[in-house]
Image (cartoon, grey):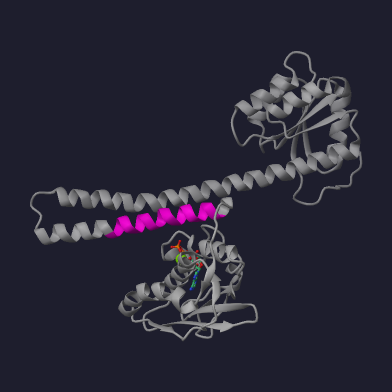
Amino acid sequence: MSEVNHAPRGHRGEVLVVDDAAANRFLYRAVLEDDGHHVREASDGPAALALLALAQPPIELVLLDVSMPGMDGIEVLRRIRARGEGGPAVLILTAAARTPDAIERGLELGADAYLIRPVDNRELAARVRAALQIQRLRRELAALRRDQTAMLVHDLRHPLANLSMLAEVIESDDLRPEDRHNAAGTIRRMVDDLGRLVDSILTASRLEAGVFSVEPKPETLSTLAAPSVDVFRPLAARRRVALDVDPLPAVPVLADAARVRQVFDNLLSNALKFTPRGGRVHVHAETLPDAVAVHVDDAGTGVPEAERAVIFDRYRQGATGRTRGGSGLGLAIAAGIVGAHGGTIRCDDAPLGGARFTFTLRRA
Ligand SMILES: Nc1ncnc2c1ncn2[C@@H]1O[C@H](COP(=O)(O)OP(=O)(O)OP(=O)(O)O)[C@@H](O)[C@H]1O
Ligand SMILES: [Mg+2]
């Protein structure tokens, strides 16, 4: 056994070798330790299951012999998977003679891969490394999903709690009519917000699932931008932010108007959200050979260089974003829509001191 650690740093895995033959365990251990892993051994199924339940740090990968006296490998695998998600990767080892059956059954039960004995040392090391890598990616994904769900639940629950409180207010007998009226208005606004959030979640998951389609037609930018600008004008006025829209190029672009409106909505909503009172938001565009580039500049906080790569991902917010509410879906949706049109979207420093968001649409 060599002293050299061949495995790249950070790829060291917690491995359990399960085989009734001591000679096999010795061989596999040698190969895997040589590749930098921490290896434990079990000589039968029950011992393996006990180790899996107790080992700290947890076992990430099990190399499992199929034919063992007593509890065979297939039964061990079944019990590992019966414990639910988040278990280790399992590689089953089977002899050439009983291959097809055992492999089929093993994969059915959730084995990640199989190896046929006798095993080539290099192949063993490579398969274990690959399975560990996949296992880690799977775990990261699961954690990400849990985080996102928790955040969404929070976003949905908070307004629901307020709605229920407002309902109680309305129900109370000694309420003045104007208070009742105000409470009803607040409820209506909150329900609208919730509706928009649910729409965003739906759009974002459609984009993610690739079942989102656009129907681009020749349109002019001023027609595309107008409905959003009209909606945000009163908000800008209330916040004392100048919303300046330059005359936009008249060349037709290929756009699904309803979808591109969502892009304008999300970019203007962000620009206004992050620009302090007295600031300015500036919408302008330039004509390129094949496309038109639209800029939404603001005089707000800007987006730090390091955050620019992640803010277009679902549920991702920058440091300032997290303090201003929202769910981190707006830019993911904008990017998905622009991408579906064959355009690009990016974030840069704006000449106004804040952020510049630029997206392109192809010319008709
Ligand atoms: N104009 C801007 N100025 C500064 N930071 C911005 C701007 N636009 C976006 N960001 C940053 O990018 C993050 C992601 O924006 P995005 O629109 O996806 O989500 P959000 O606005 O936080 O929530 P939502 O749009 O779902 O209500 C924001 O949280 C913020 O950190
Ligand atoms: Mg937003």
Q: Percent position (x, y) of residue 182?
A: 18, 61
Q: Would residue 220 appear left or right of 109 to someone viewing this image?
A: left
Extreme residue toward the top, this view = 70
In front: 360, or 253?
253
Tell me, yes or no, if residue 311 can be seen here.
no
Q: Percent position (x, y) of residue 341?
A: 58, 66
Q: Would residue 186 appear left or right of 141 to someone viewing this image?
A: left
Q: For the image shown, how many numbered marks are present on the structure? A: 0
| Looking at the image, residue 318 lies above or below residue 225 | above
Residue in the image at 41% along x and 66% along y: 324
Q: Quadrant of residue 80?
A: top right
Q: Percent position (x, y) of residue 164?
A: 26, 48
In front: 168, or 249?
249
| Looking at the image, residue 176 lies above or below residue 58 | below
Q: Quadrant of residue 288?
A: bottom right
Residue in the image at 72% along x and 29% along y: 107
In front: 25, or 154?
154
Residue in the image at 19% along x and 48% along y: 168
**Quadrant, the N terminus:** top right
Q: Quadrant of residue 109?
A: top right
- Residue 205 colored magenta? yes
**Quadrant, the C terminus:** bottom right
Q: Percent position (x, y) of residue 294?
A: 54, 78
Chief SS of the magenta region: helix
In front: 129, or 197?
197
Tell me, yes or no, if residue 26 can be seen here.
yes
- Residue 168 colored magenta? no
Start and end of the magenta stretch?
A: 189-207
